[in-house]
Image (cartoon, rainbow, N blue to C red):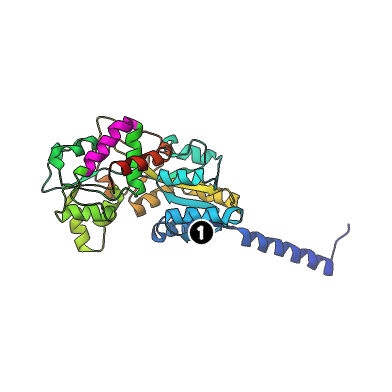
Amino acid sequence: MYRQSGPGLLIVAAAIALLNLQSAMAAEVNVYSARNEALIKPLLDLFSADTGIRVNLVTGKADALLERIRREGANSPADVLITTDAGRLHRAKTADVLQAVDSAVLTAAVPAEFTDSDGYWFGLSMRARPVMYAKDRVDPAALNDYENLTNPEWKARICVRSSDNIYNQSLVASMLIARGVDATEDWVAALVANLARDPKGGDRDQIKAVAAGQCDIAIANTYYLAHLLNSDDSDERSAAQAVAIHWPNQSGRGTHVNVSGIAMTRAAPNPGHALQLMEYLVSDAAQTWYAEANYEYPVKPGLAPSPTVAAWGEFKADSINVSRLGEFNTRAVMLMDRAGWR
């Protein structure tokens, strides 16, 4: 039997070592994330620890990240995009910077109403946008549906952020889908007439304004209230404790919900590792961590939200496929402009 020895064996061993090194160096995935680094990096670090795949994280504003991917084109280093709201995910899809993903793991974990119908993106967490009210000034029995916020009794009592906010655009898109153009335009105009002040600030600011008596009602995403309730700032905790949640439209279509989501970019240089990350983020452990850190609802059925969120009780959510919110975004924005929502 022939056995190689000497310099030839050393060359082969060196070549194998080099290939192993190159393979190890290639084990990475590049993430562009609109989520705050503190709310996503710990989970990405767990993924790296479990898989040995290094995650290179770039964070930024959602629209700026999409524009960056668009400008980078075929040379973009981004493998996945993590962003908030189905409207933004739809923008990325229509910008042709994503690729469809066929994954039995993702399909099994994420309900169809929280995914793109063509497989271009998948929800990672579910968020609700209900009505919040001052406990000491509003009788919750007087609250009903979103539609009732236009009643005369709420004149100069409502706070909401501006119309350029994607969360409000998606809320209006959901109403367009449910009620049509004329009824929605009437609703938006009447809602604007009931505002206590011109729209300004984010959702936290609307909640704080209710607590401060500047208005009695706000429309805001629930996780903002949860973050205030768990804040290190005692004033923020006090403000949040003065506010309660009302789940609108419980006898009809349900409370408006949306998602944060993930997509693989068209130019992804590491598609295999990107898919591993996408599937990891819908695992039970990742979904539970994500929900507890962000105070959002797990998108995967059967998993419990954080104790803070669970304390608000269950509610009926609008069952519309959230991908349709993006499809109606342009119409919603035009309608909001016509109705004078600043």
**Image spot of residue 141 (x, y percent):** 14, 37
Quarter of the image with the N terminus is bottom right
Is 180 in the magenta?
yes
Is 151 in the magenta?
no
Residue at point 30%, 31% (across, down): 182
Above-or-below relation of 217 to 30: above
Work out whether residue 220 or residue 197 is closer to the camera in this orientation and state it: 197
Work out whether residue 67 or residue 205 is closer to the camera in this orientation and state it: 67
Q: Magenta region, mostly helix, strand or loop?
A: helix
Q: How many marks?
A: 1
**Image spot of residue 24 (x, y percent):** 63, 61
Q: Quadrant of residue 113?
A: top left
- Please tell me how crowded label 1 is: few (under 14), some (14-19), or many (20+) other residues with Cα within 10 Å: few
Work out whether residue 5 or residue 23 is closer to the camera in this orientation and state it: 23
- What is the secondary structure assignment of the residue under circle 1? helix
Work out whether residue 339 or residue 292 is closer to the camera in this orientation and state it: 339
Left/right of residue 10 with respect to residue 296 in the rendered view: right
Above-or-below relation of 233 to 158: below
Q: Which residue is mark 1?
A: 49
Q: Quadrant of residue 248?
A: top left
**Image spot of residue 38 (x, y percent):** 39, 61
Amino acid type, callout 1? Ala
Q: Which residues are magenta?
A: 178-192
Residue at point 23%, 35% (across, down): 147
Above-or-below relation of 24 to 289: below
Specify whether residue 47 is in view.
Answer: no
